[in-house]
Image (cartoon, helix red, strand yellow):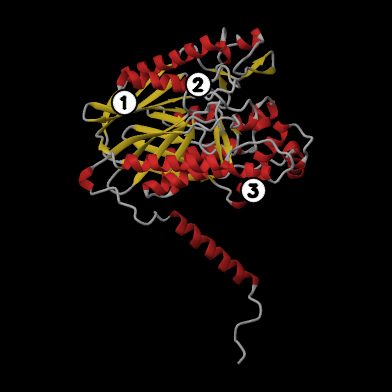
Amino acid sequence: MRSEMPARMPPHSVFFILHFCMGLLAAVAWLPAAGCVSPGPARDGLRAAAFECDATPPAGHPACGGWIAPLGEVEAPLLLKGIVLADSRTRYVVASLDWCRLHNGACDLFRRKMASAACVAETQVAVHCTHAHDAPLADTEAQRLLDRAPSAPPHLDLRFMDEVTDRAAAAVRGAIGRLRPFTHVGAGRAKVEQFASARRVFIEGTLHVRSSATKAPAVRDAPEGKIDPWLRTVTLFEGGRPILRMHYYASHLHNNYGDGKADPDVAGLARAAMEKEEGIPHLYFSGCCGDVTVGKYNVGPAEDVHRQLAERLAAGMRAAIAATETAPVSEIGWKTVEVVLPLREDGQFAEETLRRQLGDAAERPERRLKAALALAWRERVTARPGIDAGRLRLGPVTILHLPGEAFVEFQLYAQSILPNGFVAVAANGEGGPGYICTDAAFSEGGYEPTMSVVGPPTEALLKEAIRELLR
């Protein structure tokens, strides 16, 4: 008997079936894991619990993606610290990791495992890095590309990635068992004195880089430039009692790095000091600090400056706590949007150039690492172009979750949309784009555009996403 099925399906039919199957698989991927427990009845109200786990890599692990000396001695543990929020319908997870950046599959792995532990979709998990440099910069796909290249430099221990993300998931599950009510939210802000300064310094029309350790007096001593001097602190209260605090400030943290000692940097020191004083969890989030460093105030012996910067940051935290105003909160507002940032194809970012650098055993290690990261991002956006930006709203408090090492311009722009509101910003989410610059920076030059794999009209696209989130 002859089949009535045609020998070949029309191309458009094949496309439809493939598209349907991909959509079905994507839908299944977002479903909560089997055995998940719902947050609870409505009478439970809003609840929260903090969590943390050790995220310190083993001795010998590459630091800052492989650019600097590998880690040996542990100056202080690198931590993943976060919070689980719950209402009567669902849960949300927000976390801060004492690493430099999380790219591509590394970011996905943390989000996926924590989402599974919380029984929610990955879009309800936000993970940000504090941007410490004596710490991993992680991209699982980049490491797999390096594994296939001859005599490639190391970047990331994939076994360690599995272990640390398992610990993160376990910490989230533990927090769900400790959820406690919160009834009020507090918002306070204060200036951090003699800490942040613009990295891009123009002197007589010429652009200079004021790095975290700037030796040229004229560049170092130039005015602070465009920064956001305000540290913002968000506190959750049970009645009149604070149960945890989250701090947001926009600056690179380090004044010195590359000594092989794992270190959560000055934010870790300030955070630990506040926890010791108050006996409650404190979380720290780096804001849009892609073009902001401590370069102007990094003067003197490195250890002394390190301690001074930590003390100045802690002083800002105390002042923001003292300025905190509270308001009742009855619901959690959570929103995510996808933003697609244009892939760079120019010059050093051409695919042919990147693959040649990656495969050349005689090429400098840092160039091969940079090529692997750029190629990993290229492959990622080819398969899945969009990345998440998000917004958490608690009463009068709005918290933005943004990707990459975004310029401070994006933080100031967000705050200009709600000039009478309280807008805190956590950047360094999905780190694959590298620096997210203003469009003008590409014509001005400088360091940041050389380390960005996305280009114009990035500024307009990210600002559009910010407007949508704050609408």
SS for callout 1: loop
What label does residue 18 carry, if any? none
SS for callout 2: loop
Query: x%, y% of residue 223?
Result: 57, 11
Query: x%, y% of residue 220?
Result: 61, 11
Out of 468 and 285, give the one closest to the viewer. Answer: 285
328 shown above or below 261: below
| Residue at image coords 32%, 42% | 176
What label does residue 280 carry, if any? 1
Mark 3: few, some, or many residues within 10 Å (few <14, many ≥20)?
some
CA gap, disc 2 and disc 3: 36 Å
Badge 1 amino acid: Ile
Out of 288 and 178, give the one closest to the viewer. Answer: 178
Mark 3, residue position: 379
Q: Tell which circle, 2 or 3, labels the residue nearer the N-terminal end.
A: 2
Badge 2 amino acid: Glu
Q: Tell which circle, 1 or 2, labels the residue nearer the N-terminal end.
A: 2
